[in-house]
Image (spheres, grey):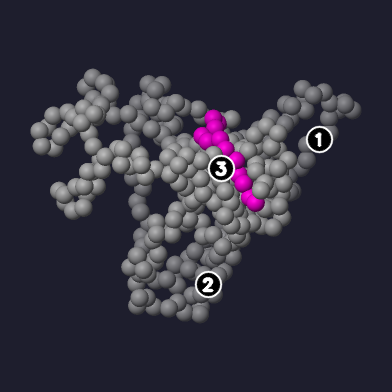
Amino acid sequence: MPNAIWTGSISFGLVTVPVRLVSATRSQDVRFNQLEAETGARIRYRRVSEQTGEEVPNDQIVKGYELEPGRYVVVEGDELAALKPKASRQIEIEDFVDLSEIDPIYFEQPYYLIPDKDAEKAYRLLADVMKDENKVAIGRFVLRSKEALVAIRPVDGALCLETMRYADEVLEPGRDIEMPEDAAAPSARELDMARQLVNTLTGTFDPEKYRDEYREEVLALIDRKAAGEEVVASPAPEEPAKVLDLMAALEASLARTGARQASGDADDAAAAKAPTARPAKRAAATKETTAKKASSPKSTATKEPAKRTRKSA
């Protein structure tokens, strides 16, 4: 289990639930170090003055806020310390709202809240009620010397805390981002075909279906090079030609998805007609025989790729 980032309690009314905060995600990015090509030595960075070109020690570095190019206001460390929010060990719930009222753009970083010892009943009470009422709790707490706006929601019996962006941090199309105003409205036929395409591609969300293929290819490349294999770069694939005719693009998309579905149906039908395995001669198969059959290449189950564990540099 990840180490606790913060310990405290959730409070709503006079009810207090002691909890610990742990990360709900982990980065799987492939990280590289910069090396000198000839020696293979690590490249290090230094803090250098633009004026003198000399390295500046940490005790001579101050914070400056740029008002305009080349003009700064220097803010001392003790001045910032005086403004820091007071450390608190409590997440006080201010409101309960419907999850559908929160646009996902406001969510920032997820964490899990784990109940402390002897707090399981109160934790379960809050999680169950929020699930039954489809509510999300909105509150604030201090994390790493910064006050954070948070949303707490039930997820599979656990409470997930999401730090949130404030309203003035979210850009709005039309107000903060320029949007085209003279775009032509789609025709009724285009709308109808687009609906068909969306319905054809509609399914249930399965997070295991989506993989970071680029990361897998990078790790495979690293493994091959580490094994001494000479790798020849493949030519970059040609980009598909842009279809400027919207109706032609819709028709081609529907034709492609239709062909893909027909292929899938044919595969399913062939699998259904495939002869079943003959019954074992012995009345009672041993566990070893059963295990061998389960791992046979004829099994339709797809083996999941082995998980990698790499130390980040």
Q: Is residue 259 magenta?
A: no
- 300 in relation to 12, above or below: above
Q: Quadrant of residue 35?
A: top left
Mark 1 and mark 2 residues within 8 Å of each other at the beta carbon: no
Q: In the figure, is residue 138 to the left or right of 289?
A: left
- Determine the residue positioned at 36% across, 68% down: 175
Q: Residue furthest left?
A: 52
Where residue 84 sits: x, y (%)? 39, 43
- Determine the residue positioned at 65% across, 41% down: 17
Q: Quadrant of residue 215?
A: top left
Q: What residue range appears in magenta?
A: 2-13
- 81 in relation to 227, above or below: below
Where residue 22 sits: x, y (%)? 55, 36
Determine which residue is flagged by label 1: 278
Instruction: Indicate the amino acid at tag 2.
Output: Met
Can residue 239 be seen? yes
- Determine the residue positioned at 25% across, 26% down: 43
Judged by depth in the image, the label closer to the viewer, 3 or 1, is 3
User: 30 or 291, which is in the foreground?
Assistant: 30
Residue 193 numbered tag:
2
Instruction: Indicate the amino acid at tag 3.
Output: Gln
Q: Is residue 4 magenta?
A: yes
Where residue 293 sits: x, y (%)? 74, 30
Where residue 247 sits: x, y (%)? 45, 72
Residue 90 numbered tag:
3
Question: Element under label 1?
Answer: loop
